[in-house]
Image (cartoon, rainbow, N blue to C red):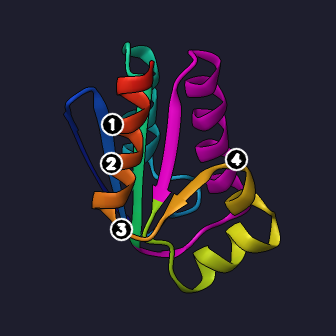
Amino acid sequence: MKSLHSEKNGIAYIAVRGRIGKPINAEFQKTIREILKSDTRRLLFDLSSLEYLRSSDLRLILNAVKEIQRKSGRVVFCCLKGYVKEVFAVTCLDSMIAVRDSVESGRKELLRGLKAA
């Protein structure tokens, strides 16, 4: 598993690729911790290349969502496919957290939220 992290226009962007290993990949955990320690209030997850999601991985991601929302921030997931999309649908996460079809539409959603904030 690889995670790529960048920040632009007040939006933290995380692209997750491959499978998140067991135990949860240390690089991914570190990336999430760094984002949560910062003043970041907008987070975009690109899951287009994520093949598999364990419940412990999902818990880490949901804890990040909860922390960002506690800061009055917003989180958008984009590019869900296959098994990961199915997990979001079965757990009804796709109805509780913003999900968009592309990175660009996810960014627009978060930028719209920034202008309104």
CA separation in Å, label 3 and label 2: 10 Å
Query: Which residue position holds label 4?
Result: 59
- The C terminus: image quadrant: top left
Give left or right: position of 68 versus 114. right
Segment colored magenta: 49-77
Give left or right: position of 66 versus 40. right
Query: Are the residues tagged 3 and 2 within 8 Å (C-beta)?
Result: no
Which label is found at residue 2?
A: none
Instruction: Tell me the element at label 1.
Output: helix
Residue shown at the point (47%, 40%) measured from the top left: 29
Query: Which residue position holds label 1?
Result: 111
Which label is found at residue 108?
A: 2
Residue shown at the point (73%, 58%) measured from the top left: 95
CA separation in Å, label 2 and label 4: 26 Å
Give left or right: position of 95 versus 97. right
Please tell me whether residue 50 is drawn above or below residue 82 in the rendered image.
Answer: above
Magenta stretch encompasses residue 71: yes
Query: Which residue position holds label 3?
Result: 102
